[in-house]
Image (cartoon, grey):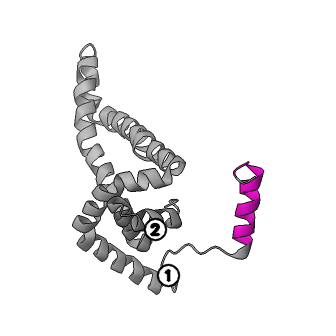
């Protein structure tokens, strides 16, 4: 999302195939974000699905010394699994990748371009249904449905230049 469009466009003109795919994603940001959200949701459900039984298997031997605790294995597992899976998913599955992507936006955009394009093509029908449903709900609440497009005002550009100068990027 933070990748500079001009940089990706230049790489596309230079013949970079990954840049062409990254530019395709940038051109339909609404679909891209919806596909990412579907992927994150699928990953969350999958982690929960497999995480709970795995944590139960890990906890069961620890409770062998406390036979009466086995009656509470399911609720204990549910709480521990929820906390552990949520922690790991948020840190490893969300925060770390976002921090890396924000630090190296163009490099990461090119790196994930092919797998993301594949996933976007596979998930297109499902994402389309979700977008139609979302847009219908927005219209029901009289919220305008707009394309997510980044346009910079003169003030935005002035602030960008000033901040870049202050940070030593522009001399």
Q: Nearer the viewer, residue 53 or 4?
A: 4
Q: Residue at x 44, y 51 (%)?
A: 107
Asked if the stretch drawn in magenta spans residue 156, the answer is yes
Residue 38 in view (yes/no): no
Report the side of 145 relative to 89 (left or right).
Answer: right
> For the residues carrying marks 1 and 2, which lies nearer the camera in this image?
2
- For the residues labelled 1 and 2, say whether their Cβ atoms are less than 8 Å apart: no
Q: Residue furthest front?
A: 14
Q: Which range is magenta?
A: 155-169
Considering only vertical position in the picture, is 39 above or below 67?
Answer: below
Report the side of 155 relative to 61 (left or right).
Answer: right
Report the side of 67 relative to 38 (left or right).
Answer: left
Q: Which mark is residue 61?
A: none
Asked if the stretch drawn in magenta spans residue 140, the answer is no
Q: Which mark is residue 9?
A: 2
Give the image location of residue 36, x and y in percent. 37, 60
Residue placed under numbered mark 1 in the picture: 146
Task: Tell me the chief SS of the magenta region.
Answer: helix
Give the image location of residue 29, x and y in percent. 43, 70
Q: Residue at x 42, y 73 (%)?
A: 27
Q: Real-space Cα distance between discs 1 and 2?
A: 24 Å
Q: Secondary structure at mark 1?
A: loop
Label 2 packing within 10 angstroms: few (<14), some (14-19), many (20+): some
Q: Nearer the viewer, residue 37 or 107?
A: 107
Q: Secondary structure at mark 2?
A: helix
Label 1 packing within 10 angstroms: few (<14), some (14-19), many (20+): few
């Amino acid at each position: 999302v933070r990748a500079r469009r001009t940089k990706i466009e230049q790489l596309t003109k230079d013949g970079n195939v990954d840049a062409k795919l990254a530019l395709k994603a940038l051109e339909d940001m609404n679909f891209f974000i919806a596909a990412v959200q579907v992927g994150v949701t699928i990953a969350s459900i999958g982690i929960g699905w497999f995480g709970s039984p795995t944590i139960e298997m890990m906890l069961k031997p620890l409770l062998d010394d406390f036979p009466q605790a086995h009656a509470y294995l399911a609720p204990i597992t549910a709480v521990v699994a929820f906390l552990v899976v949520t922690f790991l998913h948020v840190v490893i599955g969300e925060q770390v990748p976002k921090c890396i992507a924000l630090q190296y936006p163009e490099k990461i955009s090119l790196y994930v371009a092919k797998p993301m394009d594949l996933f976007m093509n596979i998930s297109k029908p499902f994402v389309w249904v979700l977008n139609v449903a979302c847009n219908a709900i927005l219209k029901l609440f009289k919220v305008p449905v707009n394309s997510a497009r980044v346009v910079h005002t003169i003030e935005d550009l002035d602030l960008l230049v000033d901040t870049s100068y202050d940070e030593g990027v522009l001399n």
